[in-house]
Image (cartoon, rainbow, N blue to C red):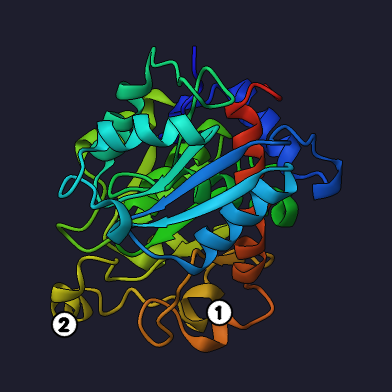
């Protein structure tokens, strides 16, 4: 059965440990599981970190990445996701996609369930989520790798997310649950995790302390995490969100209420002066740029898992 990676929950706890273990290795020590293979990198949304991480992850595994912009395929406009997936499976050994709607990934994966490429090198071609409106699981793997490198074993540590409970927040809470972290999330009313999110996190073994008070969430935390208030695609709400999220900036005062050795995380890009101050983002407790670097080994390890090389 093909191993797709659409959400953090696609991994068992054992799988997650295997992925994190592989991601922690120096890149030259990873098996070259993609030797002679290629990966289609389909980007409906552009990204600095995701494109560079994904391309170099494929190269690190011995493969050849092919970057494909939405204008070249026209997802659900010029061609349906199912048709795109089956065509790409004829050329490539993996399809990694950064899309507007999570449903696109699900439709691609369903189309390839049982599909046997006529020309391609692999009988089963996995679909890897590089971002959707629902989740950002490759980011979450990089985040957990960073947490393990900076605050030690995650079990029992307090992870506080401040801001819009978006796709990054959902995946972060899910992976935190799987690793036994104490979870908190502070968001304005109407911008927090919904009941479905909390139920999914609960199924993975976690419980989120939900609040509208950033200081309450940050108190004594080991990890403070934030993201932009206005995600790509929501730019029309930017002015409204700036008003709604006043008081949710991760600044020096908020960081001071966290644990003495707390680290600050941000998936980038950052809007200094909005969700985080420049002093905190570039300060000694920030690990945001280490996070960015960890995107590469995280994607490489995920690809190894989809290929059955680990886990």
Quarter assignment of residue 71: bottom left
The one of 179 and 268 positioned closer to us in this rendering: 268
Residue at 23 percent of width and 52 percent of height:
74
Quarter residue 306 falls in: top right
Q: Camera-side residue: 256 or 228? A: 228
Circle 1: element type:
helix
Residue lying at 17% horizontally and 45% vertically, measured from the top left: 76
304 or 205, nearer to the observer? 304
Q: Which x, y percent locates residue 154? A: 64, 43
Q: How crowded is mark 2: few (under 14 residues within 10 Å), some or many (20 or more)?
A: few
Q: In this view, does 99 lie to the left or right of 65?
A: left
The disc placed on residue 53 is none
Instruction: Measuring from the top left, give residue 302's x and y in whole percent.
Output: 60, 37
Q: Is residue 175 above or below residue 216?
A: above
Tag of residue 239: 2
Is residue 195 visible in this depiction of the protein?
A: yes
- Residue 144: x, y in percent? 60, 47
| First reached walking from the N terminus: tag 1 or tag 2 | 2
x, y percent for residue 215: 40, 68
Residue in view at x 66 percent, y 62 percent: 293
Side (left or right) of 277 relative to 154: left
3D distance between C-alphas at marks 1 and 2: 22 Å
Among the 4 quarters of the image, the one containing residue 261: bottom right
């Amino acid at each position: 059965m093909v191993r797709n990676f659409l959400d953090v929950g696609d991994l068992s706890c054992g799988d997650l440990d295997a992925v994190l273990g592989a991601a922690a290795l120096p890149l030259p020590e990873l098996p070259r599981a993609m030797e002679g293979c290629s990966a289609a990198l389909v980007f409906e949304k552009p990204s600095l970190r995701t494109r560079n991480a994904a391309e170099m992850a494929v190269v690190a595994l011995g493969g050849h990445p092919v970057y494909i912009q939405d204008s070249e395929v026209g997802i659900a406009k010029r061609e349906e996701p199912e048709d795109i997936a089956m065509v790409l499976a004829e050329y490539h050994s993996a399809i990694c996609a950064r899309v507007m709607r999570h449903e696109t990934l699900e439709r691609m994966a369903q189309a390839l369930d049982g599909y046997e490429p006529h020309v391609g090198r692999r009988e089963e071609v996995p679909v890897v989520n590089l971002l959707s409106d629902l989740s950002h699981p490759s980011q979450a793997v990089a985040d957990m790798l960073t947490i393990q490198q900076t605050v030690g074993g995650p079990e029992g540590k307090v992870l506080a997310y401040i801001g819009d409970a978006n796709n990054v927040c959902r995946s972060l809470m899910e992976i935190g649950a799987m690793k036994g972290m104490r979870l908190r999330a502070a968001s304005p009313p109407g911008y927090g995790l919904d009941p479905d999110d909390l139920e999914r996190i609960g199924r993975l073994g976690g419980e989120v302390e939900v609040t509208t008070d950033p200081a309450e969430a940050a108190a004594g935390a080991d990890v403070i995490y934030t993201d932009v208030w206005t995600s790509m695609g929501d730019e029309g709400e930017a002015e409204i969100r700036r008003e709604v999220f006043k008081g949710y900036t991760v600044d020096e005062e908020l960081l001071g209420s966290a644990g003495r050795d707390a680290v600050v995380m941000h998936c980038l890009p950052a809007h200094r002066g909005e969700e985080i101050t420049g002093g905190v983002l570039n300060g000694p407790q920030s690990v945001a740029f280490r996070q960015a670097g960890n995107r590469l080994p995280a994607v490489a390890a995920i690809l190894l898992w989809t290929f059955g090389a680990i886990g």
